[in-house]
């Protein structure tokens, strides 16, 4: 192929479905990529699998596959996704069942595993705690390495029409088809760096078409209600054009591309990835036409040989309550409510690790903000990290108790408690992590 057309089907687990369906039906895509895993998402999935061994994959997998499988099959579009989360094998098996129900035949579904390193993480020091992961003992829930393209490319080379993995580097989902189609060498650092650039620009889907960009009167975006997801047309050198389908809302400009380029990276000249250290410092964006941006100038250097690992662990319980105050003097009433809850929880202080009281709209983002005495309303929130569920429950109860034992005019109170699943990170040698490919089934045959 001289060029590859890759579309972004999703940028996070709860992303909208309609733009992906549109791309599947009208995009003339070679690949449709659903990037659906956040740092905590896979840890939550691992936690679910502890109680339901058959689960642990993306809860929206079935809805998405039912919506796009037929169109992708008809149009020759291959699907790549990390919706496997903690259970790529289970996700692949469910996808096969859905394909059968849709009457599709000849479909190959691959599961890529190997990112789960929980069984060997104990001796590695966590950046956030400064202690070996083993110090958390029974609190450990998950440890997943960000794998690169090797397993993904192997699945594509085996003929996978649908490729489902767990924790892979986000850009790797887009880099893999480029490596596969163009035959890029694993030490072709420049092309690999450019492929990572394409992946980074597409991985958050509508962020580059005006979502998470719009700021009324400052950065206006037209028809945001019907925003479309982006697609990239990539050549064998890794140069790309970012565009979207005609008739979709939003827009792609140099500004949206620049914002996405700088999103979630530390050093633009050294964007550390499993397959390459990408260099974005010389990237250029040129507007060829409305909603059509040419991307060039990406480079790369040799990979570090280390893989990031996200480690999930139980870290106590969250107890939270909220209540609203409106009208004259509402800020002062909200501040009094915080003081009352804090005082009433003092007998439980030995079971409370940390607490926070805030007025949403006043100081929940900036604790040093000065309140406007004429604010029409505030929402008081009080939260605490507790050692046990019972203490967490009491935190919420004290907020709800403000109805009749607190300031005037409180309303809309609610409370809840839940276990806290914290995330820490470390590095492991890439040579200790091996991806594995299992072709679950060729419909009508045994793989």
Image (cartoon, rainbow, N blue to C red):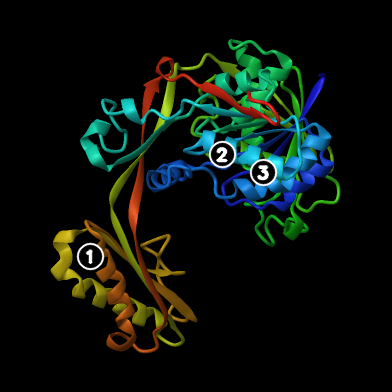
Left or right: 432 in relation to 249: left
Is residue 291 among the parts visible in the rendering?
no
Q: Secondary structure at mark 1?
A: helix
Which percent across, then down, holds residue 2?
A: 82, 19
Of badges 1 and 3, nearer the viewer stands 3
Mark identifier at residue 91? 2
Q: What is the quadrant of the C terminus in the image?
A: top right
Of the image marks 2 and 1, the number of the one nearer the N terminus: 2
Mark identifier at residue 98? 3
Q: Secondary structure at mark 2?
A: helix
Which percent across, then down, holds residue 190?
A: 64, 15
Query: Which residue carries the number 1 mark?
Result: 391
Query: Do the residues bearing badges 1 and 3 touch, measured as CB atoms within 8 Å?
Result: no
Location of residue 137 by image quarter: top left
Of the image marks 2 and 3, the number of the one nearer the N terminus: 2
- Callout 3: 10 Å neighbours few (<14), some, many (20+)? some
Height in image: 186 above or below 24?
above
Which percent across, then down, holds residue 250?
A: 75, 52
- Callout 1: 10 Å neighbours few (<14), some, many (20+)? many
Which percent across, then down, holds residue 52?
A: 42, 47
């Amino acid at each position: 192929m001289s060029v590859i057309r890759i579309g972004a089907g999703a940028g996070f687990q709860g992303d909208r479905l309609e733009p992906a369906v549109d791309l599947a039906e009208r995009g003339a895509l070679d690949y449709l990529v659903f990037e659906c895993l956040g740092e905590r998402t896979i840890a939550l999935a691992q936690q679910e699998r502890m109680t339901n061994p058959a689960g642990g994959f993306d809860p929206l997998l079935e809805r998405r596959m039912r919506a796009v499988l037929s169109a992708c099959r008809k149009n020759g579009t291959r699907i790549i996704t990390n919706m496997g989360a903690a259970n790529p094998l289970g996700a692949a098996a469910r996808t096969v069942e859905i394909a059968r129900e849709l009457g599709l035949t000849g479909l190959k579904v691959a599961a890529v595993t190997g990112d789960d390193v929980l069984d060997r993480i104990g001796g590695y020091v966590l950046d956030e705690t400064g202690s070996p992961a083993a110090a958390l003992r029974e609190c450990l829930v998950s440890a997943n390495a960000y794998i690169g393209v090797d397993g993904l490319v192997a699945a594509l080379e085996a003929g996978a029409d649908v490729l489902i993995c767990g924790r892979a580097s986000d850009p790797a989902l887009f880099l893999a088809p480029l490596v596969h189609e163009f035959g890029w060498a694993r030490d072709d650092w420049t092309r690999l760096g450019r492929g990572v650039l394409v992946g980074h620009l597409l991985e958050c889907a509508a962020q580059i078409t005006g979502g998470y960009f719009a700021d009324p009167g400052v950065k206006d975006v037209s028809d945001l209600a019907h925003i479309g997801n982006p697609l990239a047309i990539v050549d064998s050198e890794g140069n790309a054009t970012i565009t979207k389908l005609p008739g979709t809302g939003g827009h792609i400009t140099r500004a949206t591309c620049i914002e996405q380029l700088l999103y979630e990276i530390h050093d633009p000249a050294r964007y550390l990835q499993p397959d390459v250290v990408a260099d974005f410092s010389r990237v250029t964006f040129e507007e060829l036409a409305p909603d059509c941006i040419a991307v060039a100038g990406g480079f790369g250097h040799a990979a570090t040989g280390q893989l990031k690992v996200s480690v999930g662990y139980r870290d106590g319980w969250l107890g939270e309550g909220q209540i609203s105050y409106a009208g004259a003097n509402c800020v002062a009433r909200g501040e009094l409510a915080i003081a009352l809850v804090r005082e009433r929880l003092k007998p439980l202080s030995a079971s409370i690790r940390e607490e926070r009281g805030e007025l949403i709209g006043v100081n929940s983002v900036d604790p040093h903000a000065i309140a406007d005495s004429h604010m029409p309303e505030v929402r008081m929130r009080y939260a605490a990290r507790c050692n046990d569920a019972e203490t967490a429950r009491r935190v919420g109860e004290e907020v709800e108790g403000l109805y009749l034992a607190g300031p005037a005019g409180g309303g809309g109170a609610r409370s809840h408690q839940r276990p806290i699943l914290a995330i820490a990170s470390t590095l492991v040698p890439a040579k200790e992590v091996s991806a594995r490919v299992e072709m679950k089934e060729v419909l009508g045959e045994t793989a």
